[in-house]
Image (cartoon, rainbow, N blue to C red):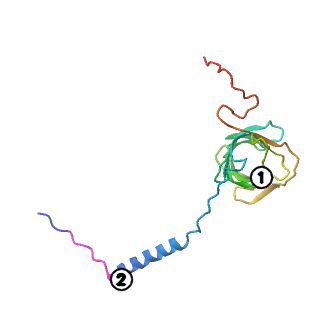
Amino acid sequence: MTTPRPTPSVSRRTTLAAIAGGGLGMALFTGSQAAPVELVDYSDHPLCGVWLAMANPPLPESPQIPVPSIFAADGTVVLSFPLVQLGPNGVQFNSAHVGVWEPYDDQIGHFTATQSISDIEGTLLSTVTVDGHPHVNADGQTFIDDGSLVTVTIRDATGAVIGVVPPGTPGRPVTAVRMSPGVSGFPGNAPGEATPIS
């Protein structure tokens, strides 16, 4: 025979406090929601798509690097830089630049994207935010960003600005080729016979 366990008693005051607290929580939850975000569709802009950009590395004397880049129709942008690069203070580990973009005019886009930089121990060193303005050629297959509108903002690990490269600073332009099936974006990308791997 089993003995029934006593049911703990809950006072009226505890019950009312729980209901009031839950109601307050629901009011705060629903009251703190931001207004709905308006969805965008930039699929008609010539910058929308996937590109292979030849971008500038941390050291100005190093050769430009291939950076697969996605400018999505919903206004998001991802610039996939190499994970490890040689920087001013030695080897550094990079995240992708991630951010947003919008049309600047009929051929130019404006993006803002941020990258995190860490050292070999995994300590966050800085972030780099780029405001770029790629200008898509009339044929829609290439773009160039000559730096005339570009701003680069460098922040330390706490987010404090430690450097700004203003628009018009001399430097190599960033160029890109639109990627598509069979077109990698690299120069001389004509399809050819594969070389067997032994």
Question: Is residue 115 within the magenta segment?
Answer: no
Q: What residue is shown with label 2?
A: 13
Q: Which picture quadrant has residue 166?
A: bottom right
Q: Which mark is residue 198?
A: none
Q: How many marks?
A: 2
Where residue 47 sits in the image (x, y, percent)?
72, 47
Which residues fall within the magenta stretch? 5-12
- Earlier in the chain: of badge 1 and badge 2, it is 2
Q: Position of residue 55 (x, y in %)?
A: 77, 41
Query: Where residue 106 is drawn, which disc sits there?
Result: 1
Q: Residues within 10 Å of mark 2 (few under 14, many from 20)?
A: few
Picture quarter with the C terminus = top right
Quarter of the image holding residue 20?
A: bottom left
Q: At label 2, which amino acid type do we have?
A: Arg
Secondary structure beneath dot 2 equals helix
Q: Is residue 101 above or below residue 38?
A: above
**Farthest residue in the bottom direction?**
13
Visible residue check, residue 56? no
